[in-house]
Image (cartoon, rainbow, N blue to C red):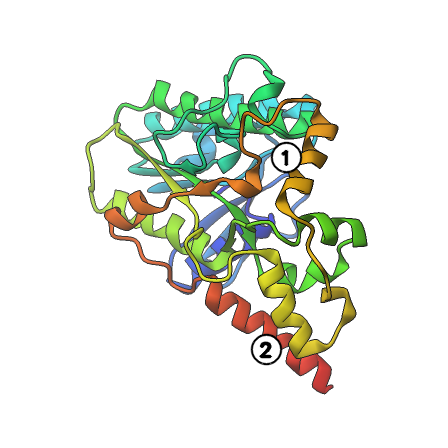
Amino acid sequence: MTGATGRIGKVVVADLIERGYAVRATTSKPLVGDGREVDGLLEWRRFDFMVDDDWDGLVNGCCAVLHLAAELGKMERMQRVNVEATRQLAQAAERQGIAAFCYASTISVYGSGRQRLIDETSPVLTVDRDIASQYWALDYVRMYGRTKLAGELALRAVAKRTRFTIVRPAVVVDINQLIGIREWSPTKRLLAAHRHAHHIYVGDVSDAMIWFIVRGLAGHGLPGEVEVYNLAEDDCTDPRHIDFMRKAFSVSHDRRYKCMPIPAIADWLHDFLRFRTLPLRNPLWRMRFSNQRLKEAGFRFRYGMADAQRRALSNLDKSVGN
């Protein structure tokens, strides 16, 4: 498993070990001791995607690969980490006879859609060059979307025997991040409160990736097949930031949750002024990401955002009581 020290990766590692799987996890940091932990179920391997090249040695002896590692912020590293390393890892998986491979991509590959409802067949970014009008976002965010899409294409190019699953998560959050909305600046609260949050709970993302790996190991689908799924819960109840903020204020009386959202048209105008492009596409907050294909595959959310919000509110209530 790559990306094991990341915010999502830590949850996936813990879930795998809880279910009895032995995990070989990568880190670019120096190892402490022999790298073995948790009753021998967790083995750490130091591996730097920028310089190391023993990809076969990394996956040898494994039955599946979960690839979460990515470069999100440093543009000069994105091509190597998000594209070339993904290709080399997939090639090694093919050579070593890995049965199942799950790749964490992103909804950023869709950019700013011309249509509001986005499914797995919707248009994606132009992968080989930057077209700013396709995505209302900062330069590094557009490049992140393009390179993650290029990583998807790299998997398709090498797939022969391994069963590949590409998941495109929406905005992944944990309980602390939900509570942390109160740390937003007044300007951000004013602009963003009305937005559809596109939140999906990190526990559900972990559960979905493990579910797809187990499915692949069980022989679902054809060898060399590449499946793509949105990981989103845009159809949950109370999906806007302001919906949670109002509940949080009622529980905590923390005035940082108190906000009067501005009309959506003002937010759209703000984007127009930032990115100097006509509003012929939908900004992220106006788009909706379908999970219909995920449901048709048989996956059901183990937790859901309603449960995540309940736990966040419970934590706030306890903190007030203390």
Does the image show residue 175? Answer: no
Q: What residue is shown at x 56% (from left), y 38% (from top)?
A: 284
Q: CA distance from mark 1 to mark 2?
A: 32 Å
Secondary structure, mark 2, is: helix
Q: Given the current orientation, which residue lies at the most extreme top position?
A: 129
Q: Name the residue nearer the viewer: 21 or 9.
A: 9
Q: Given the current orientation, which residue lies at the most extreme right position?
A: 186
Return the x and y of residue 196 as percentages of the image width and height: 55, 50
Return the x and y of residue 260 as percentages of the image width and height: 71, 59
Q: Mark 2 sits on what residue?
A: 314
Choose the circle earlier in sequence order: 1 or 2: 1
Q: Rate crowding at label 2 as few (under 14), some (14 to 19) or many (20 or more) other CA atoms within 10 Å.
A: some
**In the displayed structure, would residue 238 be above or below residue 213?**
below
Q: Name the residue nearer the viewer: 212 or 292.
A: 292
Q: Which mark is residue 72?
A: 1
Does the image show residue 43? Answer: yes
Is 227 on the left-hand or right-hand side of 230?
left
Mark whose residue sits in front, 1 or 2 = 2
Q: What residue is shown at x 61% (from left), y 57% (from top)?
A: 241
- Choose top left, top right, bottom left or bottom right for residue 123: top left
Q: Which mark is residue 285?
A: none
Q: Name the residue nearer the viewer: 63 or 255.
A: 255
Is 301 on the left-hand or right-hand side of 202?
left
Secondary structure, mark 1, is: loop
Tell me, yes or no, whether the two marked residues, 1 and 2, touch with CB atoms within 8 Å.
no
* Amino acid type, label 1: Leu
Return the x and y of residue 33 as percentages of the image width and height: 64, 52
Q: Name the residue nearer the viewer: 29 or 101.
A: 101
* Amino acid type, label 2: Ser
Q: State the quadrant of the C terminus.
A: bottom right
